[in-house]
Amino acid sequence: MTAQHKIHSKDLNLWYGDFHALKDVSIAVRDRMITAIIGPSGCGKSTLLRCFNRMNDLNAAVRVQGGLFLDGQDCYGARLPLTQLRKRVGMVFQRPNPFPLSIFDNVAYGPRVHGVTGKDRLAEIVEQSLASTALWDVLKDRLWEPALDLSAEQQQRLCISRLVAVEPEVLLMDEPCSALDPIATEHIEELMRTLAEKYTIIIVTHNMQQAARISKETGFMLLGELVEFGQTEQVFTNPRDKRTEDYVTGRYG
Amino acid sequence: MRASQGMPKRSPLGAWLDRKQDLFISSILLVVALSAISGLVVITAFIFKEGLPIMLQVGVGKFVSSSDWYPAEGHFGIFPMIMGSLAVTAGALVIGGVLGLGCAVVLTQFCPRWAVSILKPSIELLAGIPSVVYGFIGVVILVPMIRVHLGGPGLSVLASSIVLGIMMLPTVTSISVDALQAVPKAYRDGSIALGATHWQTTRMVILKASRSGLVAAMILGMGRAVGETMAVIMVAGNTLDVPDSILAPVRTLTSNIALEMGYAAGDHRKALFATGVVLFVIIMILNTIALTVSRRRSRRKSGA
């Protein structure tokens, strides 16, 4: 395992009760780059994503087996407490989910949770975080308005700002544009490209064009298996596996 | 067209009957609905009609601010009862509010689903116990305990607050649970994914998101406490003094009416109705305050 691999899993298996949702998934995600995971609905791509920050732990019926490492450190080990793991590996959800608080309080939430209290320090973090998603200029006079008043795109940007505020290393994005219109989608993709200079981004999408547009590497999943993983161009133009070829050429899915 | 769809063709008489039937049913429903409301109106009007004249005769200010209640001599001042009702209700709100809210938080945030399905109905079952039973348990167990360990006569503001606090638990808990469960799961996920603990998530997101519902739970619990009579009579002591400590005995507005209605006549009886008027006004004020608070909060939340 080389140093530039940010997250890797080794023979990761996951069961929802009796249902075997992930089968021996071994994946190595490289640092400061966008990695896409594609596949038809129900293939386990979101489940895999939710393993990386252990969101699956919230579901009592889930059982996980195998290894998962962040910078070579065991994600399930005692040396990496759950809250620390989730601080370092943040998540953007399918539907924008800002809290029913003010814009400021949404962004300041993460830092507050992790013990930042100084008013000036919080204001500074909020400004930087909103600036990093190009929201600061638009919203700087509206910081105390309810976040739920924003448009869907702004809400999703705000969710990304909220994440950036805790200085994560990895951003997990679970179909972050599926609730947005095409223009907003384009804006968010642009934002992702900028963010990829600082963060490792893993995006789950069932939109193949989106994966082709923004990612450097792509993994294709089917029925809980990681069928193929490689350079995005290679996966889309010259897939090694027949099943990948069938999927990317639109024969099913 | 009807016939072409296979519906039997109605004669003009049948169609007329159909229309009449609708009219008939809807007027019956209207009468039923109105009778419920008119019941309220009649009761209100009756209380005011019976109570207002004596209040005006004594003077509204004097009636609510005087501490002299000597019905035989024509002195009617209910200040101690007003203070009693407020003290007991505030105490009950502290005890029942904290316990009920705590219960609801544990049930919705920290309990497995199967435990909730057992615990919530059992708490709601508390509502089915007659108030005289609460009062009886209070007199037999709580009052002696307070007398021995804390001093005073035992029959006290504290005893009433505890009994009323427990009595309002089902109301507060079940409405709070509903409010907390109505918070979208996405808020919790978002917070957890930022590395917040369950408790941080509950305190900083979920309680805030459900605030208006929780205020409503407190209002309804408070309504139960202000209006409760039997259990309070049994444990409050019913003396006619303004309580100077939580261990002092107390008489509430409701107890005053219930205790004296049996033998009151003339002005005395009217003064009891006037007590009812004051009770009515207090409840109206409390509800209005609480409703405005919860409505303003929810409006700010939705941003309108």
Image (tube, helix red, strand yellow):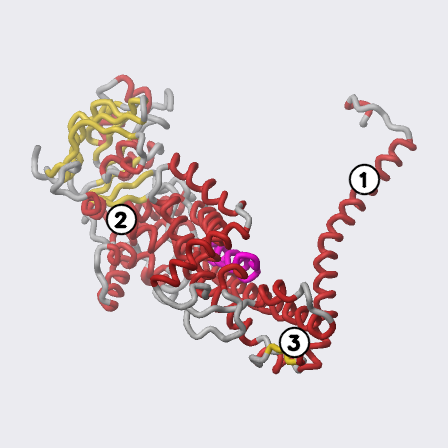
Count the marks: 3
Q: Amino acid at mark 1?
A: Asp
Chain of the residue displaying label 1: B
Residue beneath the point at 50% across and 56% down: B221
User: Same chain for marks 2 and 1?
Assistant: yes
Say which label, 2 or 1, has the lower sequence index.
1
The image shows residue B256 at horizontal and vertical percentages of: 60, 67
Q: Of tags 1 and 3, which is closer to the observer?
A: 3
Q: CA distance from mark 3 to mark 2?
A: 61 Å
- Mark 3 and mark 1 in contact (Cβ < 8 Å)? no
Q: Which mark is residue B240?
A: none
Q: Kindly indicate whether the residue at mark 1 contacts the one at mark 2 (C-beta within 8 angstroms).
A: no
Residue B42 location, quadrant: bottom right
Counting residues from the start of the chain, the first of labels 1 and 3 encountered is 1
* Residue carrying label 3: B71
Q: CA distance from mark 1 to mark 3?
A: 56 Å
Q: Position of residue B151 (x, y in %)?
A: 37, 67
Q: Nearer the viewer, residue B129 or B40?
A: B129
Q: Can residue B302 be spotted in the picture?
A: no
Q: Residue at x 70, y 64 (%)?
A: B44
What chain is tagged by disc 3?
B
The residue beneath circle 1 is B22
Name the residue type under label 3: Pro
Q: Specify the label residue B197 is tagged with.
A: 2
**Region rendered in magenta:** B213-231
Is residue B1 shown above or below B22?
above
Q: Is residue A49 visible?
A: yes
> Crowding near pointer 2: few (<14 within 10 Å), some, many (20+)?
some
Residue under disc 1 on the same chain as residue under disc 3: yes
Q: Is residue B171 left or right of residue B13?
A: left
